[in-house]
Image: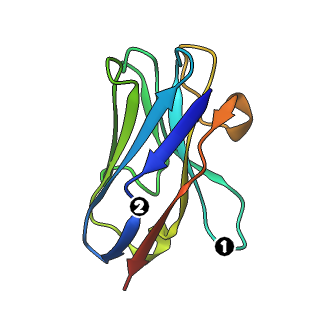
């Protein structure tokens, strides 16, 4: 039962990054991305249902970030465009034992280790 996030790094404002989250150990259902900036609470970024038909975004990333998944590869993605300094955070992927996507942290059962995204202004 493991989630492995990758793809973080240092990028200039306006740039792009693509995060990946590889799932192993069991079949996962709805998945999501959260982030935590220094001194702040972990916050919701985006989530996607098992079939990919239901997607949610935080208002702060809507129109800039795109979540997707490949159920054959058991991998979750987050394409981040037009990055801003305020997007700087550790990004965590999460999974829950249900097909239904949620936007609340407490609804997720499994968490990855996080990947650092730093956006320089």
Residue at 51%, 42% in the rendered image: 4
Residue at 45%, 16% in the rendered image: 50
Residue at 55%, 36% in the rendered image: 3
Which of the 4 image quarters holds residue 13?
bottom left
Residue 73: percent from the left, percent from the top?
A: 33, 24
Residue 35: percent from the left, percent from the top?
A: 57, 55
User: Circle 2 is placed at which residue position?
Assistant: 8
Name the one closer to the observer, 62 or 112. Answer: 112
Secondary structure, mark 2, is: loop
Vertical arrangement, residue 57 with respect to residue 11, above or below? above
In front: label 1 or label 2 = 2
Q: Is residue 14 left or right of residue 62?
A: left
Dot 2: few (<14), some (14–19), or many (≥20) neighbours within 10 Å? some
User: Circle 1 is placed at which residue position?
Assistant: 38
Tell me, what colour scheme is on the image? rainbow
- For the C terminus, the quadrant is bottom left
Vertical arrangement, residue 53 with respect to residue 48, above or below? above
Vertical arrangement, residue 97 with respect to residue 48, above or below? above
Mark number displayed over residue 15? none
């Amino acid at each position: 039962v493991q989630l492995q996030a990758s793809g973080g790094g240092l990028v200039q404002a306006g740039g792009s990054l693509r995060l990946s989250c590889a799932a192993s150990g069991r079949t996962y259902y709805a998945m999501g991305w959260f982030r935590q900036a220094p001194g702040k609470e972990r916050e919701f970024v985006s989530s996607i249902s098992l079939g990919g038909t239901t997607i949610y975004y935080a208002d702060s990333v809507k129109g800039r970030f795109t979540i997707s998944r490949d159920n054959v590869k058991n991998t979750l993605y987050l394409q981040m465009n037009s990055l801003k300094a305020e997007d700087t955070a550790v990004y965590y992927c999460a999974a829950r034992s249900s097909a239904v996507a949620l936007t609340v942290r407490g609804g997720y059962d499994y968490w990855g280790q996080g990947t650092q995204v730093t956006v320089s202004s």
